């Protein structure tokens, strides 16, 4: 028998994490939201990208603190359940479900690029077809190999670099004037709404914290990775914003995807490479990838008893099919009802920011609920200091949510309000069962010991 100690699991270093974070940020958001934001901010779009990146970084602070203090647990549902209680955790996951109307933006974005090349097809039909296809793939349990996924990222990065390289020489640089009527042609609130939407496109780095227990010195590495990766991508995105809003008249590109500008700056063969190899691949893989993980929080909630436990059951491929269909419906409804991308994006980002605010509230309670763990954290500070920081961030989160949700149509706002009321009532009704189930499981665990 060997006396050598068991080799420890290799952990991710700073460079590994940077690669993962940048790959997570760069995706469908830039392809879907740029035209939407041009419609709101005009030539202010590059500046809106910078502001959006700052918002993305600042709103990650509570998540950074929690990850650095409890690095083994990365999901918001778990943080909130542990620090705020079971009721709050289900309200969080319920808001998360509502925010996943954003799934429709991936499908509709794919359809808009597909139909730019094949105009004979109907966009709504193509979007539903993409959503159905990716849902079936996930039900079967077929996973795209890492090689294929990485290849798609290479195509995407190359496409965007070409977009910048071919586009910058054709930009009218006078469009970057810092005059208020140029940067905020539709007023401050529209600029703020655009920046709030782009905070979603610049987000994603925080998910590196999901693997905090596999990262070297997570308390130091994760904050650096989040700030640096988001900053690098923000500059990259701002350059794309310069090209997207500065080559053709704003009136022509507002609300459109990037194909109009791509046609203007690329020869035909490169235009096709950009649309197919970049945009379509990015959106389809994002849609498929989202459906592969989006059920996990709701599955945990079902196992806790908030929903019938049978809903958490998996098929032979390990997929909770019923819960997957919940998110299929969330993506399909905006497509079937003809909601436009601006409305979908505002609803999704606005409700997502509310769920992030709940993570902030969990962080607020950290010194009281887990005082010993917090004292050992690299982010330890006086409770008053922590609360002062979180107050500022919370105000930013609520403002960001407000500027998005305030643009909802009356029917959409009413539907959101009804959903939240039903969610709250169900939480109150079901909590007795959930608490009793948890107490029984704790007693059984003690008895087994």
Image (cartoon, rainbow, N blue to C red):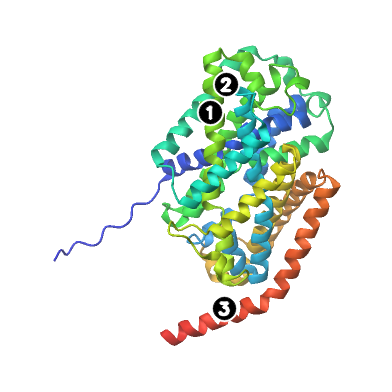
| Mark 2–mark 1 CB contact (< 8 Å) | yes
Q: What is the CA distance from the residue labelled 2 to the residue labelled 3?
A: 54 Å
The tag on residue 438 is 3
Location of residue 339 in the rendering, given as x and y in whole percent from the top left corner: 75, 41
Image quarter where the C terminus lies is bottom left
Residue 442, above or below 335: below
Q: Earlier in the sequence, mark 2 or mark 1?
A: 2
- Mark sitting earlier along the chain (3/1): 1
Earlier-in-chain disc, 2 versus 3: 2
The residue tagged with tag 1: helix, strand or loop? Answer: helix
- The answer to whether one can see residue 207 in this image is no
Separation of residues labelled 2 and 1 (CA atoms): 10 Å
Q: Secondary structure at mark 3?
A: helix
Residue under circle 2? Answer: 163
287 horizontally vs 360: left or right:
left
Vertical order, 75 against 136 (above or below): below
In the displayed image of the protein, which residue is found farthest to the bottom? 447
Residue at 49% x, 46% y is 137
Instruction: Characterize the local packing of mark 3: few (<14), some (14-19) or many (20 or more) Cα atoms within 10 angstroms.
Output: some
Q: For marks 3 and 1, give the CA distance.
A: 47 Å
Instruction: Estimate how packed mark 2 is, as few (under 14), some (14 to 19) or many (20 or more) residues with alpha carbons within 10 Å.
Output: many
- Identify the disc placed on residue 278: 1
Q: Residues within 10 Å of mark 1 (few under 14, many from 20)?
A: many
The residue that appears at 66% across and 41% down in the rendered structure is: 199
Q: Nearer the viewer, mark 2 or mark 1?
A: 1
Left or right: where 81 falls relative to 339: left
Point 79% across, 54% down: residue: 415
Task: Out of 94 and 67, give the one closest to the viewer.
Answer: 94
Q: Foreground residue, 249 or 182?
A: 249
| Residue 412 visible to an observer of this rendering | yes
**Residues at discs 3 and 1 in contact (Cβ within 8 Å):** no
Q: Which x, y percent locates residue 190?
A: 80, 36
């Amino acid at each position: 028998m060997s006396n050598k100690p068991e080799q420890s699991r290799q952990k991710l270093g700073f460079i590994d994490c940077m690669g993962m974070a940048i790959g997570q940020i760069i995706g469908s958001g830039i392809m879907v939201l740029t035209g939407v934001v041009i419609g709101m901010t005009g030539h202010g779009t590059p500046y809106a990208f910078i502001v959006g990146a700052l918002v993305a970084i600042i709103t990650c602070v509570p998540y950074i603190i929690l990850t650095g203090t409890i690095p083994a647990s990365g999901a918001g549902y778990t943080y909130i359940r542990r620090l705020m209680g079971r009721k709050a955790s289900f309200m969080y996951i319920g808001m998360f479900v509502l925010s996943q109307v954003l799934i429709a933006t991936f499908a509709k974005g794919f359809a808009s690029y597909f139909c730019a090349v094949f105009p004979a097809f109907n966009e709504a039909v193509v979007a539903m077809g993409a959503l159905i296809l990716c849902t079936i793939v996930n039900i079967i349990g077929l996973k795209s190999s890492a090689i294929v996924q990485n290849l798609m990222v290479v195509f995407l990065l190359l496409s965007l670099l070409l977009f910048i390289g071919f586009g910058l020489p054709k930009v009218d640089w006078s469009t970057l004037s810092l005059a208020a009527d140029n940067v905020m042609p539709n007023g401050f609130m529209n600029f703020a709404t655009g920046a709030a939407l782009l905070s979603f496109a610049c987000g994603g780095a925080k998910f590196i914290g999901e693997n905090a227990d596999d990262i070297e010195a997570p308390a130091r590495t994760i904050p650096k990775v989040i700030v640096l990766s988001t900053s690098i991508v923000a500059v990259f995105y701002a350059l794309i914003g310069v090209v997207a809003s500065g080559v053709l008249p704003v009136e022509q590109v507002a609300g459109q995807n990037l194909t109009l500008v791509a046609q203007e700056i690329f020869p035909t063969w490169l235009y096709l490479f950009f649309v197919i190899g970049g945009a379509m691949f990015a959106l389809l893989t994002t849609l498929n990838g989202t459906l592969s993980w989006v059920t996990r929080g709701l599955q945990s909630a079902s196992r806790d008893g908030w929903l019938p436990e049978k809903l958490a059951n998996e098929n032979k491929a390990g997929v909770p099919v019923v819960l997957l269909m919940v998110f299929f419906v969330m993506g399909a409804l905006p497509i079937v009802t003809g909601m436009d991308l601006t409305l979908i994006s505002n609803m999704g980002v606005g409700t997502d920011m509310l769920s992030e605010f709940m993570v902030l509230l969990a962080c607020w309670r950290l010194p009281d609920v887990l005082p010993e763990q917090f004292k050992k954290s690299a982010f330890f500070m006086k409770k008053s200091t922590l609360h002062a920081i979180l107050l500022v961030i919370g105000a930013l989160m609520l403002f960001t949510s407000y500027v998005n949700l305030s643009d909802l149509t009356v029917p959409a706002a009413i539907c959101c309000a009804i959903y939240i009321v039903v969610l709250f009532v169900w939480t109150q009704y079901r909590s007795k069962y959930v608490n009793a189930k948890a107490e029984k499981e704790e007693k059984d665990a003690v008895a087994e010991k």
